[in-house]
Amino acid sequence: NAGVTQTPKFRVLKTGQSMTLLCAQDMNHEYMYWYRQDPGMGLRLIHYSVGEGTTAKGEVPDGYNVSRLKKQNFLLGLESAAPSQTSVYFCATSKLAGGRGTGELFFGEGSRLTVL
Amino acid sequence: DAKTTQPPSMDCAEGRAANLPCNHSTISGNEYVYWYRQIHSQGPQYIIHGLKNNETNEMASLIITEDRKSSTLILPHATLRDTAVYYCIVRAVRAGNNRKLIWGLGTSLAVNP
């Protein structure tokens, strides 16, 4: 039971290159999220998904695209990488929130991206 | 969702209790208090949550004041492995409301030998 797995864990890109981060979960959770974490700032939500085939914008979606073709996978794409996208990216999942305040987030180990 | 205020850093001696405060004075009646921690550069890890009653699990205890405007996370016997950044977050109990979470900078707890 791996939980939430992110690949790759490290990547260096040149400005203008494209890449895709993969998040895979084996917990059968409905919700999936992509966050970025930068020094001096809290986690910021990029995009999220409430189920297979659906995605929505978060707080900082510009420059990113996402897809959720299968329930267990959530992909984050950078079409034309910029130095401002240098960051640590975290994927998270959660199940439907219930009446007792469940719905806590389960995070992957992070993907460190550097754009030169 | 309401914002929270936490001290930027705290120290604790190994084996002693670590008491991490959080202020959430604008919390509304349907919002829970959640605590997460982030060890070094790993992904955040859920610790505990509560509404108005005190809660305890194998990791920590959560004490919420009667007016719910503040809470304290207690690590009863801190170890070096508890050195981490601790985040206090409030969220409403509705499906999908993780998308509205406001993650501050948390409290950086250093457990010293």
Image: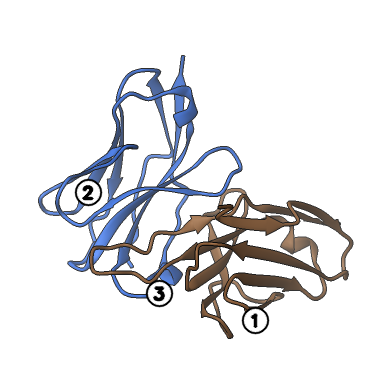
Give the colour chain B carries in the figure: blue
In the displayed structure, A51 sits above or below A84; it is below
- Chain bearing tag 1 is A
- Chain bearing tag 2 is B
In the displayed structure, B51 sits above or below A22; it is above
Residue behind mark 2: B70
Using the rendered view, name the quadrant where residue B25 is placed.
bottom left
What is the letter of the brown chain?
Answer: A
In this view, the residue in front, A114 or B16, is: B16
Amino acid residing under circle 2: Ser
Contact between marks 3 and 2 (CB within 8 A): the answer is no
Residue behind mark 1: A69
| Residue B56 appearing in the image | yes
Q: Residue at x 17, y 54 (%)?
A: B68
View extreme (bottom): residue: A53
In whole angstroms, how far apart are the C-alphas of marks 3 and 1?
19 Å
Q: In this view, does A100 lie to the left or right of B53?
A: right
